[in-house]
Structure formats: C-alpha cells, structure tokens
Image (cartoon, rainbow, N blue to C red):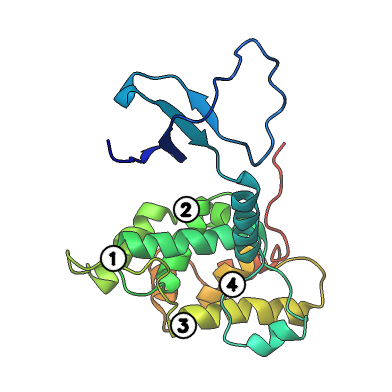
Amino acid sequence: MASTSITLSALSISPSTSQPHRNPSASSPSLPCHLPPYNLSTTFMGKKLSIRIPNLNHLASKHRTAVATVLFSLPTAKPDRNSTGKSPKWSARAIKSFAMGELEARKLKYPNTGTEALLMGILVEGTSLAAKFLRANGITLFKVRDETVNLLGKSDLYFFSPEHPPLTEPAQRALDWAVDQKLKSGENGEITVTHLLLGIWSEKESAGHKILASLGFDEEKAKELSKSMDSDYVPSF
C-alpha cells in the first residue's frame, strides 16, 4: 500500500510501523513545546499512526507580534511625527472604535472607511464617555447607520470591501486632528475616543459631521464634551 498522510485538525498523522508502543501505565511528564512522535493503535489501514505536535512557541510568538502592531498605532498622514517619538499613544477604546469602524464600512460594503464609519465604530465599541454622551443625546448606532445609507446610498450587492478599507481624506484628517489637539493640550495620557469624535466633528463637509448635525449634535454639545476630552471612561457607582 502506498504511503499516506492523514491530517486531523492541526496534527499531522502518517502511518508508521517502526515506532514501539508507549506504556499507558508510565507516568506522563509535563508536555514540552516540541514533542516527539506518539503512536496510537488503530484498525485504520491496519497500521499504527504516528502523531507529531507542532512547535507552539513559534505560533505564540507570531501572535504576540501581531497584537503589538495593532495596539500602538493608527494611520497618520504625518509619519515624521511618529519617527521623532513625539506622537502620543491612542487609548485601547479609541483603537477598538477605529477597528469597529472598519468593520462597519465592510458590513455596508463601502470601499473606504469614512468619518461616518468611524462614528459608527465609536457607538459599536460603546463603553467610552463619547459613546455614552452620544446615546444620552439620542444618537444611536441604528440612527447613524440609517442616516449613512440615506446620505451615501447602498453599495453594489456583489461588491466586497477590502479587509482594511482605506481611510477617506476627511477620516484621515479627523485622526490627525485628534493627535494635534492632544499635543497642543500639553497633557500627559492617551488620545481618547472623545478626541476622535471631535475630530470627526471638525470635518465640516464630511459625512460624519452631517450625520451628527442631522441627529442634533451641535457646537454647544461639542464644547460640553470637550471638557472631558482627556478621559475615556468614568466608572459609575
């Protein structure tokens, strides 16, 4: 019979006749990350199966690298600022809001992530002061989504958005506005979701600004929200 390789889940299995049986009564030491092959008795093909477990350390290190890449950066049109180390970090809630905005753009099958998608991302994340302020003033995810479709229309049924829809120019300016405001304040700490929301509001001709205005957000509310610009979350008692 020809040599055959069988794959079960992530384990590579191949027929073997040269490996001895393991003693089931022997004590089982803690498993190292790279294990020798193990044999299983089976009637399948009338042979013994040799199982090799992949090196898990390699997979874990790759995963950690990917997470670190996501957690500390958002797109910027001013890369020189990052190279000098003067750019403050985004808060975890702001980064999650951005990621949720990309996802909302993909759900609507839009080719780009615009200010309207960033606004939806803030509401999807939902735990920041900015998101709570919006909901308290009657601005919800469903209303924003409906206004987005009314303003921009629906995408083609057979169009598929890229995994990371590129930012529109107004959306990129909104991100950079948030960073600039943080630098101007001279305050320590992170760039918050409130910075991001007010960055969207600063883009007067953008879809995000128009949607906010249509739902009752105005300069007075923006000033009220700006008082808590450096806070992302206040625990309730």
Instruction: Point out the frontmost of discs 1 and 2.
Output: 1
For numbered disc 1, what is the local secondary structure?
Answer: loop
In this rendering, does residue 145 appear at all?
yes
Residue 133 horizontal/vertical position (percent): 57, 55
> Residue placed at 77% from the left, 80% from the top?
85
Q: Callout 2, which amino acid?
A: Val
Q: Callout 4, which amino acid?
A: Leu
- Relative to 144, say whether 126 is above or below: above
> Residue placed at 82% from the left, 78% from the top?
186
For numbered disc 4, what is the local secondary structure?
Answer: loop
Labels 1 & 4 near each other (Cβ < 8 A): no
Rounded to the nearest whole Å, what is the CA distance between mark 4 and mark 2?
18 Å
Q: Callout 1, which amino acid?
A: Lys
Q: Residue 74 carries which label?
A: 4
The first of marks 4 and 2 along the sequence is 4
User: With 91 as the anchor, is 101 left or right in this view?
Assistant: left
Q: Name the residue under label 2.
A: 124
In this rendering, does residue 213 appear at all?
no
- Relative to 94, say whether 201 is above or below: below
